[in-house]
Image (spheres, helix red, strand yellow):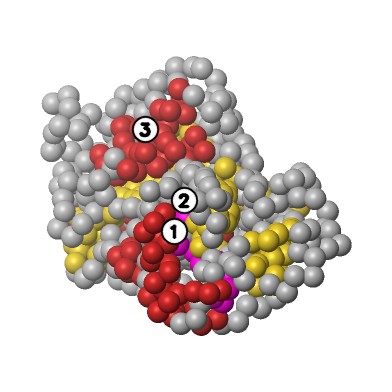
Amino acid sequence: MLAASPLIADNPPAPAFVPGTGTRTDVKPYYFAIPAPRGQILDRKGRPLAQNAVVHRLQLTVPAEQRGTLETYTAWLEQEIAASKHDLPAARMPDADQVKRHYEGRRELPLTVSDAVKQEITIDPQKHPHASVRAEYERYYPQGNMAAHLLGYVSADGAPPIGQVQRGEPLWQRTRGAVGLEAAYHKQLTGTDGTLCLMMTDAGTIAYEQVFVPPQAGRDIVTTLNLDTQRCAENALDHCGHRCAMVIVDSSTGDIRAMASYPRFNPNAFAGGISSDDFTKLSQDIEGPLFDRAVQGTYPPGSVFKPFVVLAGLRAGTVDAQREFECGPTLMIDGREFDNWSKDDYGFFNARAALIRSCNTYFYQSAMMTRDMPILYMAREFGFGVAPVLPVKTAAGSLPRNAPSNGDLANLSIGQGVTEASPLQVAMAMSALANGTCRPRSRLVMHTQSQSGHVGDVAIPCRETIMPVSQTDLETVRNAMYSVVNHVNGTGKAARLKKIAVYGKTGTAQWVLRGAKANVVWFAGFVDTQPPLAFAVMIEGNAGEGGLSGGGTAAPVITKVLRDIEARPEAHGVKYENTRVDQENDPLTEPVASGGFYGEPQLVRPPGYSRGPVEGFFQRLFR
């Protein structure tokens, strides 16, 4: 609930005259605006992600006889603060510039002499007649740095009042949303200011105060986030040890259940006003804690792009599901060697085997048959190259208009080259594979609501595109993604669960980080829950850092979240049938004579196979 200000509680109706003042000439009225409390930002279950807290500031009013000169004014403040330190430990002497500005324009008003404190400040009016306490609203993020990039933060709305006191000026500094949902929904979050009449005596005391109009709080924002899922996602990223991001989506509605970027920041640092030094430190941090990698970061998708290459070939009729290509360590294309991720020669793979083992050389050859237009069309239909629609800023990534050379086409087939996508885009593409019908529009906010419970600004789930693939082709890809996780030789077997079927695709891509080559690794897919949850996790490697892979590095990160979903489905808002998930161990190609496919470099050749004619065929095709 919104915290109430002590100024508002139990105020009598505005009197026709000020009691006790009569016709006194030493009493002067001032009229201030009471800034309204901002609305809350809530998760889908109504739990607060951003709300307000009441903070207190100690103030001193300098008596009229001590206001003759700035020196006299300052000396009295120093003496009073020193004398009250024992009873009022929060008291501190403001800096000289602050005292001077206050003296020049508003010396008759109380001067703030403490930082904002959450504890109540108790004053004995007999001992400290010139002291008073002002209660203010301050933005508060009860979950700390959780969902910081989505929530954003607030900043001061304009400069602090200076000069002569103006009628209706704010009683304290107003704030406005600077980034994130705080900025996107600033109008809805902002309430209506109240009005306070303050009677000040020349002696430096408050003769009377009256709230004529109480402030009205802004509207609450109800997001699609699930606090339990968000917490699990952020905890998993915290222990990753790299810059990373994760998105988890309800594939039926497009609702974002969790979206996290690491490293992050604590928006509470901005609530009371961040120092320029602290902001500079944050903004210039080479790790980029203010940068939202989940929606604004774009990276080569690598092998998580391959399911869409398969769908393109199936739809175009150029490469059917059983068509086999050699999964060798390299392939010569236009005089240049294009590598597989492995140096082994695995034999001939169809689409399923190629996805299970993420064979690059299969996809080079498949793309040469399908060509660029069907692949690019399929990628656009699944949301690549298009900025997701959200109230916060999102990146469109990069998808080429065509592949002008065979080398460009080879890179396109494995999600490399100029192709880039954000973790959110990849998660939304996976949500389309999960629901099998459409690509839903991503949704982060469900609606706003007033403090009395009236709902407005409703965002209804909707579809971006209908899937341009047959159910048969879709099942081909989904079955292969099931095997990526649940086959004994799948690259994503680290994400396997015992009770919930996980469908996934690993990815390892190369990109340029601060001018040097580095890896970025992925694991993306969906889980067979009701509703199905699609996900994507991306991890940035450092320049020259080896040992990172989609299956070995990224998959274990999301698995921590998936295991919690398996253990506590109700907390995450899903259900699933409690059945055993079978592990597959069928051979991906005909076994070699030695009895071992994966441990042996030998290759099974179909009858009549000759390396020369096959290579010659592709050389002719690539010209």
| Numbered range of the magenta stretch | 106-117
Callout 1 secondary element: loop
**In magenta stretch: residue 116:** yes
Q: Identify the disc placed on residue 114.
A: 1
Q: CA distance from mark 3 to mark 1?
A: 45 Å
Residue at x-position 55% and y-position 50%: 126
Q: Is residue 363 visible?
A: no
Which residue is under mark 2? Answer: 117
Single out the mark in the foreground, 3 or 2: 2
The amino acid type found where label 3 is placed reads Lys
Residue 403 versus residue 191 in the image, above or below = below
Residue toward you, 512 or 465: 512
| Image position, residue 284 (x, y; %) | 30, 68
Residue hosting label 3: 560
Number of the front mark, 3 or 1: 1
- Say which element carries label 2: loop
Among numbered discs 3 and 2, the one appearing first in the sequence: 2
Who's the residue at 43% across and 28% down the image?
Answer: 564
